[in-house]
Image (spheres, helix red, strand yellow):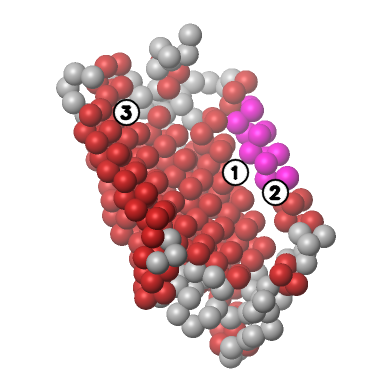
């Protein structure tokens, strides 16, 4: 058993906001609402026959996750999630869907692979749940402490991104360049 | 109930498993891509929850990198799907198995 509290050098520092019961209750309520909505929407993504509505449900999942990021003291990541995922990636999805005019009803019937596709994630979930139970993260105490002020602020994220994580940042930019070139090369008339 | 790291990790595991189920059961290439995006977002949620737990901004920065990788992946993947549709007139991956045998 690993006690994560022993590893956390900041444990015990609590600021006032998380002590107020009303804010805590509000946070729990919001979390439950957003979690239920996101799981429902995620299920609809894989159950919908129509790919268009599946993609729109995926947008709903992304909105819920952005709201959860705000709850987790990451407002900048939430904004990036909305701007890049919803604003760019999902629009690209919808654009391709509209372009292709995919016929419906192309799903096959029941097959061995489909049965495996339901059993394997179920087992994965069980294993993950067992793993989470075996690690002694203090379960009912909430997060070990309040977020340090300005944890997910633009300033903090930006400073770390351009100092500590500068090399990965440059590599990510190079990867995007490679992605652009690959997409252009694939989109040519003759492959 | 007080929301803790465990709750976020369990939600993340749920979303990830739903994504795995989508990849394995669906045959439409675009929905498979959407399921992969779902899995990446489950990982992002775990990253941000751990960043909040430890009070370290590193997890949030890794989310930025995951988003960059997802953007590159979607650009190339959707280009592949468009090219496939142009050749085969289908996005059903069961009919696109020329590399399989």
The circle drawn on residue A73 is: none
Residue nearest the observer in this picture, A157 or A57: A157
Residue carrying label 1: B17
Kindly state the secondary structure of the residue where label 3 is placed.
helix
Residue at 64% x, 79% y: name it: A10
Q: Judge left or right: residue A162 versus residue A73.
A: left
Residue at 45% x, 34% y: name it: B32
Do the residues at pointers 3 and 1 share their chain?
yes
The image shows residue A61 at horizontal and vertical percentages of: 45, 54
- Callout in the foreground (2, 1): 2
- Callout in the foreground (3, 1): 3
Instruction: Look at the magenta stretch and give its main secondary structure.
Output: helix
Q: In the rendered structure, are the residues bearing label 3 and label 2 in contact, judged by CB atoms less than 8 Å apart?
A: no
Range of the magenta residues?
A: A115-128
The quarter of the picture where residue A181 lies is top left
Residue lying furthest top in this view?
A: B101
The circle drawn on residue A128 is: 2
Kindly state the secondary structure of the residue where label 1 is placed.
helix
Residue lying furthest left in this view?
A: A189
- Choose the circle earlier in sequence order: 3 or 1: 1
| Cα distance in 3D space between marks 3 and 2 | 33 Å
Residue at 67% x, 76% y: name it: A9
Kindly state the secondary structure of the residue where label 2 is placed.
helix
Question: Pointer 2: residues within 10 angstroms few (<14), some, or many (20+)?
Answer: some
Residue at 68% x, 73% y: name it: A8
Residue carrying label 3: B80
Residue nearest the observer in this picture, A18 or A33: A18
Q: Is residue A103 above or below residue B19?
A: above
């Amino acid at each position: 058993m690993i006690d994560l509290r022993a590893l956390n050098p900041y444990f015990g520092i609590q600021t006032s906001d998380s002590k107020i019961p009303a804010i805590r209750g509000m946070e729990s309520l919001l979390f439950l609402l957003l979690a239920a909505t996101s799981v429902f929407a995620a299920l609809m993504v894989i159950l919908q026959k129509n790919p268009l509505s599946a993609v729109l449900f995926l947008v709903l999942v992304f909105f819920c996750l952005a709201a959860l990021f705000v709850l987790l003291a990451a407002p900048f990541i939430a904004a990036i999630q909305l701007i890049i995922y919803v604003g760019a990636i999902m629009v690209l999805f919808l654009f391709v869907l509209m372009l292709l005019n995919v016929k419906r009803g192309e799903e096959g019937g029941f097959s061995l692979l489909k049965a495996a596709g339901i059993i394997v994630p179920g087992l994965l979930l069980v294993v993950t749940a067992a793993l989470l139970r075996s690690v002694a993260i203090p379960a009912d105490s909430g997060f070990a402490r309040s977020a340090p002020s300005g944890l997910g602020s633009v300033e903090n994220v930006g400073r770390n991104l351009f100092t500590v994580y500068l090399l990965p940042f440059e590599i990510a930019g190079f990867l995007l360049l490679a992605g652009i070139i690959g997409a252009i090369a694939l989109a040519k008339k003759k492959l | 109930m007080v929301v803790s790291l465990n709750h976020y990790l369990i939600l993340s595991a749920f979303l990830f498993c739903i994504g795995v189920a989508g990849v394995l059961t669906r045959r439409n290439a675009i929905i498979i891509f959407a399921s992969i995006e779902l899995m990446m977002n489950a990982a992002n949620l775990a990253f941000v929850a751990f960043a909040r737990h430890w009070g370290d901004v590193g997890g949030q920065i890794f989310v930025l990198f995951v988003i960059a990788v997802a953007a590159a992946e979607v650009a190339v993947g959707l280009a592949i799907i468009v090219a496939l549709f142009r050749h085969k007139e289908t996005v059903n991956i069961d009919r696109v198995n020329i590399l399989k045998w």
